[in-house]
Amino acid sequence: MDNCKICGSKTDKIFTCKVLNKHDVDYFKCSNCEFIQTENPYWLEEAYSSVITSLDIGLISRNINNVPVVSTLIKVLYKKDKEYLDYGGGYGMFVRMMRDNGFSYYRQDLYCENLFAKNFDVDDIISSIDKFELLTAFEVFEHLVDPVSELKKMLSYSDNIFFTTTVYPKNTDLISWWYLIPETGQHVALYSHKSLKHLAKINDLHYYNFGDTYHLFTKKSFPNKLFESIFSERFQKYYNKISSNPVSLLQSDFNMISSIKM
């Protein structure tokens, strides 16, 4: 097996699992940063015959939950009048919801059809800006065959990356862990906090986390408690009183799209 795709250290086989209900796939764990990767994922074309798997029934609730969190994150740590990018943005639902809330969000996704945010893809804006203020990547990192090179691509868009991926639990039989989801064949990279810290370090970034799911790579330095407060509904309500969202882009987007169609 190849060395760790994050730190280059030796990896050890930890188990074999049936992927897509037919492929016997080996999983390997890094002896240094604890990153877990599959063997070379030869089955990905088959796994992505449907880009959004039918098992992802949390897609809508995830977007609903993430909107107030990201809105608060932007207002607390970044500039709310800049442009933002949702990387691996799927159907564009999150982008549309954020634009409805006044944030100039755009979508990037090479594989999924843009249903809800047409006219607001990365190619519609990238030529007119240097970098995005913030890049979000929800449930993307576990799909990355080469996390180091893919993170470099993300950093070409923004110095600040807010993302979700669930860190695997220690002292647990991972072969039965719900997040492994071998039925879909799409989760080929599993992280520890240690491996995420290493990813941040080699890119000269600070790493912040809230629990085992929410993570931030950024050039900024601040107390981790400030990052944690962003997830409090009480804090969100308080901060909305002192810093409102920008004016909704719903009407202006409609006017723009209407003029294009005419």
Image (spheres, rainbow, N blue to C red):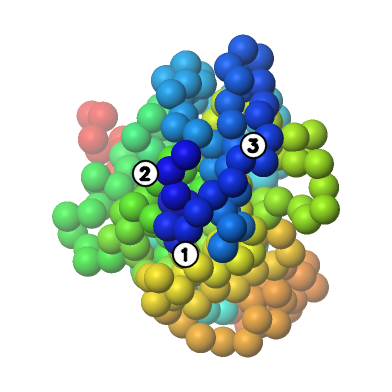
How many numbered marks appear? 3
Q: Which residue is mark 1?
A: 199
- Of the numbered discs in the image, which one, if any, rests on residue 59? 3
Q: Which residue is mark 2?
A: 108
Label 1 residue SS: helix
Which of the 4 image quadrants contains residue 45?
Answer: top left
> Is there a contact, CB below 8 Å, between mark 3 and mark 1?
no
Q: How busy is the neighbourhood of tag 1: few (under 14 within 10 Å), some, or many (20 plus)? A: many
Q: Residue at x 66, y 21 (%)?
A: 18
Label 2 residue SS: strand
Using the numbered discs, state the Cα–Cα distance from disc 2 to disc 1 in whole angstroms: 22 Å
Q: Residue at x 23, y 54 (%)?
A: 126
Q: How busy is the neighbourhood of tag 2: few (under 14 within 10 Å), some, or many (20 plus)? A: many
Label 3 residue SS: helix
Q: Residue at x 61, y 66 (%)?
A: 194
Going by the numbered disc 2, the residue's amino acid type is: Gln
Q: Quadrant of the C terminus?
A: top left
